[in-house]
Image: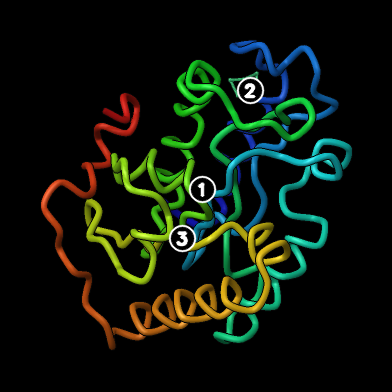
Amino acid sequence: MADKQAAEELERMAEVAATCTACGLSATRTNVVFGDGSARAQVMFIGEGPGRNEDLQGVPFVGAAGQLLNQLLSEIGLERSDAYIANVVKCRPPGNRDPRPDEIAACKGYLADQIRLIDPPVVMTLGNFATKLLLKEERGITRLRGRAYPWWNRIVIPTFHPAAALRGGASVLESMREDFALTRAVLDGRSEPQPEPGAGRPVEQLELFG
Ligand code: SF4
C-alpha cells in the first residue's frame, strides 16, 4: 500500500473511532485519542491510555511523558515523525485508573487495525498493559524488558512506560535507554530477536488477542 493510501486509511479509521461508544469510557472522555505519527513508521509505540492532557488535546503523549519519549527517540537518531504512537485504549480512563479488561477487549480491534496497516518493523510496548496484551504474558514489564521478541514478521521490544521513568528515577530511565538502544540495533540489523516459547502471537490473531 502506498504511503498516501496508508495515511488516508489511518485517517478513515480515526474518523470511525471518533464517535465510538463501544465501552463505558465514551461517557467521560473529551476526545478519542486514536494515534499520532507516520503511517509508514519504523517504530510503533503502544502505551496504556490517554491522560488528562491527551484527552483534552486528542493527541497521545503530549505532556512530560511525551517529551521524554521524544528525547529517547532523538538519542537513537529518530524523530517523532519516524514513529507512530497509540494506546491500548483510545479514551481516557477517569482519574487515570487502569483500563479494565472489558474496555481493553472493546478497543483492541482498533489497535489491531493500526498495527496491520502501519506494519512497523519494531513495536515498542510501553508498560505492562501493552506488553501483556501483545505477548500474552503474565510476567510483568520488569521481567520482560531488555529483550527483542519475534512477533509475526516484526519485533516487539517491551520497555517501561515513560511515566514510570518520570516517577521512578534514574534506574528506570537507564533501562529505557538500553531498550531504545536495542531498538536501534534491531533496525540496523545488529541484533536478532530472541525466541522464547509462548511469547508472541500471529498478527492474524490480533482481533482476538488470545
Ligand atoms: Fe471505543 Fe475504545 Fe473509546 Fe471504548 S476506549 S469508547 S472501545 S474508542
Q: Which quadrant of the figure shows ligand 1?
A: top right
Compared to 100, does 185 lie above or below? below
Residue 181: image location, x then y, percent: 46, 83
Compared to 62, does 11 lie above or below? above
Looking at the rendered structure, the kind of residue marked 2 is Val
Q: Which residue is mark 2?
A: 16
Distance, label 3 to label 1, CA atoms, is 21 Å
* Residue at horizontal 55 percent and vertical 85 percent from the top: 76
Residue 128: image location, x then y, percent: 47, 47
Looking at the rendered structure, the kind of residue marked 3 is Met
- SS class, disc 3: strand
Task: Report the side of 29 relative to 140 (left or right).
Answer: right
- SS class, disc 2: helix
* Residue at horizontal 71 percent and vertical 37 percent from the top: 33
Residue 79: image location, x then y, percent: 65, 76
Question: How many C-alpha atoms fall within 10 Å of the one at disc 1: few (<14), some, or many (≥20)?
Answer: some
Q: Which residue is mark 1?
A: 6
- SS class, disc 1: helix
Q: Is mark 1 within 8 Å of ligand 1?
A: no
Q: Which residue is mark 3?
A: 124
Who comes first in sequence, dot 3 or dot 1? 1
Q: Quadrant of the C terminus?
A: top left
